[in-house]
Image (tube, rainbow, N blue to C red):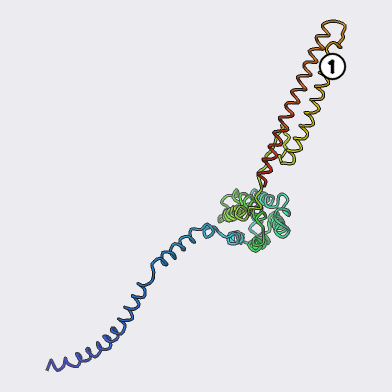
Amino acid sequence: MASLHLLPPLSKFCSSLAPLSHQHASRTPALTSLSFLNSSKPFPSKSFAVHFALTESDSPQSLEPEPQALLQEVADSFDLPPDYFAQLPRDLRLDLNDAAFDLSNGPIMDECGQELGETLLNLSRAWELSDTSTSHSLVSKLPLLVATLTGTAKSALGKRLVAAGRRFQSMGQYGQGEPQKIAKAMITAGRVLCASLTSTVTDEQVKEESRMLKFGELQVELTPDKANIGAVIGFVFGVLSWEIAQGIQSIPESSLQYANDNALLLAKSLRGALLALFYSSTLLSAFTSIGLVLLGIQLKSKKE
């Protein structure tokens, strides 16, 4: 009787195993063929993909923060209560005025452009008036303006942000540390903007190093044209010195007549000194002219 009661469940179990085994058998060829196709792929493509990914991730551009994102952090750091700047103590208000001066000091329109220059001037006035809301709205424009700036304007903006950020840094830990947050954001963004100048300058925009010739406080920049002009002046001065020396030498000693022998000896010694002076001046002028010609050729070759 017990065996009769066990037969139905056993039959159900066998019937349930039948489709599973059929399903497993139907999947086995597909898995086998799939593994065969995967094994048939060449391994160099995977290594090339890994190598390309590593190369792309190691590039400096992927590690370099975007100026727009950093300036947005600066704008977020100025999201303060409307009366925050007005409630600052007197010494911190002086630091805020110093930050406004550092932000707008110098030829700001020439360095930063019209639109950015006006924005920075208005921002400095807002700091002087302790207007927190206007400051936040003006700083929020910087992420949009930086995309249209040239490398020189970005560098000028970066220097001003770093200088003003150091003023905020000197405020110390006031309140919840808002000045330090502003200082950190401004200095970080300013340094990145200053560094962006070197990455955007092309080979045609690189300024050549100029040689300076110093005579005490007088400084003269050496160029090929100035070197050639100096050589011509040296040649003319040498010719004049030579002519004067020849004129002095053409005077015979017998024509020198003085009252006594002492005066005659003095005249002869003076004549010899003048001859030595003008002949040496002629020699030095010749060497100077040759040196300036060679220097002009060297500067011209470097310039080309």
Of residues 259 and 59, the one nearer the viewer is 259
Of residues 207 and 11, the one nearer the viewer is 207
Residue plotted at (57% across, 60% down): 66
The image quadrant of residue 297 is top right
Q: Is residue 106 visible?
A: yes
In percent of width and height, residue 161 lies at 63, 53
In percent of width and height, residue 21 lies at 26, 85
Above or below: residue 238 compared with residue 57: above
What amino acid is found at the position of numbered circle 1 in the picture?
A: Ile
Q: Is residue 49 left or right of residue 169?
A: left
Q: Residues within 10 Å of mark 1 (few under 14, many from 20)?
A: few
Above or below: residue 223 compared with residue 234: below
* Residue placed under numbered mark 1 in the picture: 251
The image quadrant of residue 299 is top right
Of residues 78 and 80, the one nearer the viewer is 78
In percent of width and height, residue 285 lies at 74, 29
